[in-house]
Image (cartoon, rainbow, N blue to C red):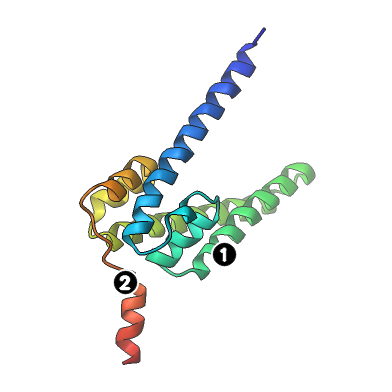
Amino acid sequence: MLTFDSQYYTLYTVIAIVWYVLQAIGLWKMFTKAGEAGWKAIVPFYNIYILFKLTWQANMFWVLILCALGGALLFSLAMWNGLIMLAYISYALTFVAGLIKAVLCYNISLAYGHGLGYFIGLYLIDPIFIMILGFGKSQYIGNRYDQAKHQYTM
């Protein structure tokens, strides 16, 4: 017999799997538009790294990981030890991780020839807008940071 809690977790798991599958399908098409192998969209974390590489700077992926993990670790330490200062630092790290995700979404929007509207959609409901970018008429324009780097080195 299923209790309310187990039904809730089952529903949450199904929604999370569907969310991830939709995102992987859209990323597969986006990656092939950008000249990357589509299979890279299936691998967790590596697909985000490829997005950073295609649209921003790959080293910012590691900054995001450090902020997210550091924020989670410091928050758990703050809760165990009652250290309020660690909680504030964890909030700041989580805020920085959110800003990095926002800039990534904006760069994805620009790399595929769109602007603020797609940025908002990517930030709020990314699998749907990733599918739109992947299956729609959007073309990969390129990484504006790579273009600026080549412009200054010539």
Q: Secondary structure at mark 2?
A: helix
Q: Is residue 72 above or below residue 5?
A: below
Give whichever of 28, 98 is nearer the camera: 28
Numbered badge on residue 76: none
Decide: few, some or many residues near mark 1? Use Cα within 10 Å; few <14, some 14-19, many ≥20: few
Say which residue appears at 36% left-offset and 74% top-offset: 145
**Place of residue 17 in the rendered image (x, y in percent of width and height, measured from the top left):** 51, 34
Q: Tag 1: residue type?
A: Trp
Say which residue appears at 68% left-offset and 53% top-offset: 85
Q: Is residue 25 left or right of residue 96?
A: left
For the residues marked 1 and 2, what is the alpha-carbon distance in whole angstroms?
20 Å
Q: Is residue 143 left or right of residue 92?
A: left
Q: Is residue 78 above or below residue 140?
A: above
Say which residue appears at 43% left-offset and 60% top-offset: 37
Q: Is residue 134 left or right of residue 16?
A: left
Decide: few, some or many residues near mark 2? Use Cα within 10 Å; few <14, some 14-19, many ≥20: some
The residue carrying mark 1 is 62
The residue carrying mark 2 is 144
Give whichever of 39, 117 is nearer the camera: 39
Give whichever of 96, 103 is nearer the camera: 103
Q: Secondary structure at mark 1?
A: helix
Say which residue appears at 71% left-offset and 45% top-offset: 76
Q: Tag 2: residue type?
A: Arg
**Which quarter of the image is occupied by the C terminus?**
bottom left
C-beta proximity under 8 Å, tags 1 and 2: no
**Which quarter of the image is occupied by the N terminus?**
top right
**Upstream in sequence: badge 1 or badge 2:** 1
**Place of residue 96 in the rendered image (x, y in percent of width and height, measured from the top left):** 51, 58
**Place of residue 137 in the rendered image (x, y in percent of width and height, measured from the top left):** 20, 51
Residue 138 appears in which quarter of the rendering? bottom left
